[in-house]
Image (spheres, rainbow, N blue to C red):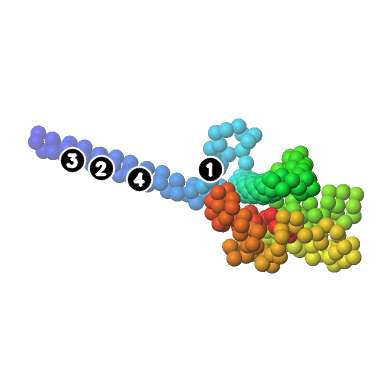
Amino acid sequence: MALEAEQNQDQEENIDLNALAQQGGDQDNQLEEQQEEAVELTAIEQKAFDQGWRPEDDFEGDKDNWKTAKEYVKDGEWIGKINDLNRKFDDQQRQFDERLSNANKLSDARRKSEIDALRKEQKTAVSMADEDAYDAAQSKIDVIEQQTQDEATSATPQQNKDPVIAAWEAKNPWINDISNVKTAVTQGIWNSFIQQNPAATNQQALAHVDTELNKLYPTEYNSNPRRNQPNSTENNQRKAKRTNKDLTMSDLTNDEMQEWNKFGKQIFKTEKAFLKTVKDTRNL
């Protein structure tokens, strides 16, 4: 009886071992099948899979919206490029808005300073009973205030424009005449330069436009009367040549240095912000 019991126990152990061996074999087969399935993905499918793509059999959404791995990756690349462009555009727009706002602040401060100086002249004229001097000062004040009003009226269409471009267009009003052949030529020069030099600044592009227009229209372009007019806000020659380099405090004219000391520090807080705005408001 004891022998029979031992034999039965041995048989049960053999059965359990065989069951465990069979279970282990099944698990190994499942792992091999999973590995084989993973290997079946092509390179493009693996790339798409890592980005969230799933094979059609595993796709849980509307089957009409399922895309191949190639389509999925391509669409993702386009979306990424569009998002990058949107971010760059937003950054540029913020920079343009800031520069335009600063240019307006400087322009307003300059006009206020001019008017204050003229008011002082009027007080002196009154004390000396000099009506002619008083009227002359008032005429200048009227001109400045009229300019301010005119710019405020036309500010809306220019509010999102780079100050550098706005200044160039102000000196070349023909650019807004679409019937002018030179307008189309200029646009072509601009587009070509931007395509070939995507990292170029607007100031560099406009300098190239000026050079090419000088070659194409040497008489007409160089004889533009507005181009040769001095800036009415400047009373002395600039120290620095027109350049794409950032200005330093030593590049400022005497008038600009006086502006910095008089109101620039209060408005712009830093020399860098003031210098950048001065550069934007200078003639190209």
List the residue tagged with mark 3: 10
Residue at 61 percent across and 34 percent down: it is 63
Circles 2 and 3 in contact, beta carbons < 8 Å: no
Q: CA distance from mark 2 to mark 3?
A: 11 Å
Mark 3 or mark 1, whichever is nearer to me: 1
The amino acid type of the residue labelled 1 equals: Gly
Which of disc 1 and disc 2 is earlier in sequence?
A: 2
Which of disc 4 and disc 2 is earlier in sequence?
A: 2
List the residue tagged with mark 1: 52
List the residue tagged with mark 2: 17
Which of disc 1 and disc 3 is earlier in sequence?
A: 3
Q: Secondary structure at mark 1?
A: loop
List the residue tagged with mark 4: 25
Which of disc 3 and disc 4 is earlier in sequence?
A: 3
Residue at 55 percent across and 57 percent down: it is 271
Neighbourhood count class around disc 1 (C-alpha, 10 Å): few under 14, some 14–19, many 20 upward: few
Mark 2 or mark 1, whichever is nearer to me: 1
Q: CA distance from mark 3 to mark 1?
A: 53 Å
Q: Is residue 250 left or right of residue 144?
A: left
Mark 4 or mark 3, whichever is nearer to me: 4
Which of disc 3 and disc 2 is earlier in sequence?
A: 3
Q: Quadrant of the C terminus?
A: bottom right
Q: CA distance from mark 4 to mark 3?
A: 23 Å
